[in-house]
Image (cartoon, grey):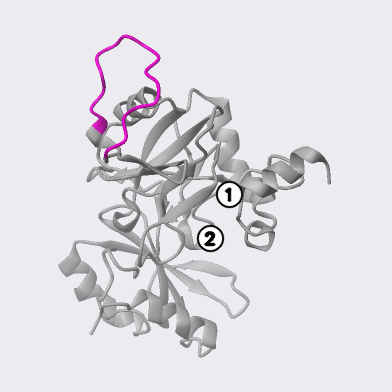
Amino acid sequence: MNDLDSRLRACNPVRAEDVADTADSTVAATLLQHVLEQPFAGPARRWSTRHWLWALTGVTAAAAAAVLVAVVLQGPSAPRVTTNHHPAPDMHLVNFTVRHGDIIARITDPDAAASQLTAVFRAYGLNVAVNAVPVSPSLVGTIVFSQVSAVRTLWKPGCTGSCPVGLVFPANFTSSGQIVVGRAAKPSEKYESMSDSFAPGEALHCSGLLGQPASTAAPVLRKLGLHASWWALAPNGTGHRQRTPAGYITDGTPISATQVSLDTRPAVPHTSDYRSWVSQLNRGCR
């Protein structure tokens, strides 16, 4: 291992086994290529958090994690450097705090315009460009893509899946990068990143449909104003589109505020992994 790898590993505490192979994943490659090919317009492909909510980009063999952040800063810390003479941005949009010499950036207003968040970062002396994309409700305010290396990631408490909501920058951070923040979708927009349809905060959470016969879903979906597309999954995980739903509802992916894709199987899985996943999805339900 060379000296650069050693330094990167020292400043990035993410365990190697937690990020193994993510740099080569289809999701990461597709999203990164899209970002690089245009003036930072955000990811074109929609992808589910339960199948890699955040993409990691390898920098060297030490694989310093490129992590995501949505940020709104508050707190007592004053900006380190202001590098232009434009009117000062609203620093209340992001709250920077300093702890043990590190700079902690945390989101408090996920609906703030991306240009305003960018201005706040730069006014604070961090050369970080921010973009925003529509996401499913539970991911609003989280970071869905990043090309910024950071010391640590701050996570949304109680989130199902991976929900980074802040970053800890080293005090001597002089690099630059880009991040994509999840914002609330407009009624006509499709989500560009999403959690599970049954996760806390999502439209079907506590709906009672998970694990139930697909034939019982119509009145519940109608009441919630949702149109469903149906996918029948085989035991090996392959699937095909269903015109008339059959079997049991075992999972779902939100597409927009009015559309959802639901998975069915001939029988509900009885594995410990699936039971654990359902327990997470049903957190807070009676």
Up the image or down, 282 lies above or below 36; here it is below
Dot 2 falls on a residue whose secondary structure is: helix
**In the image: residue 278, left or right of residue 93:** right
Q: Where does residue 60 sit, x and y in percent of width and height?
A: 74, 41
Q: Is residue 5 left or right of residue 269?
A: right
Give the camera-side residue of 81 and 39. Answer: 81
Q: Which residue is mark 2?
A: 51
Graded by Cα atoms within 10 Å as few (under 14), some (14 to 19) or many (20 or more), the crowding at tag 1 reads: many
Residue 155, label in figure: none
The quadrant holding residue 147 is top right
* Residue 196 picture location, percent across and down: 39, 65
Span shown in magenta: 76-91
Which residue lies at the image location 52% right of the left edge and 31% below the top edge?
Answer: 177
Q: Residue at x 84, y 46 (%)?
A: 1
Q: Nearer the viewer, residue 270 or 266?
A: 270
Q: Which mark is residue 27?
A: 1
> Residue 90 colored magenta?
yes
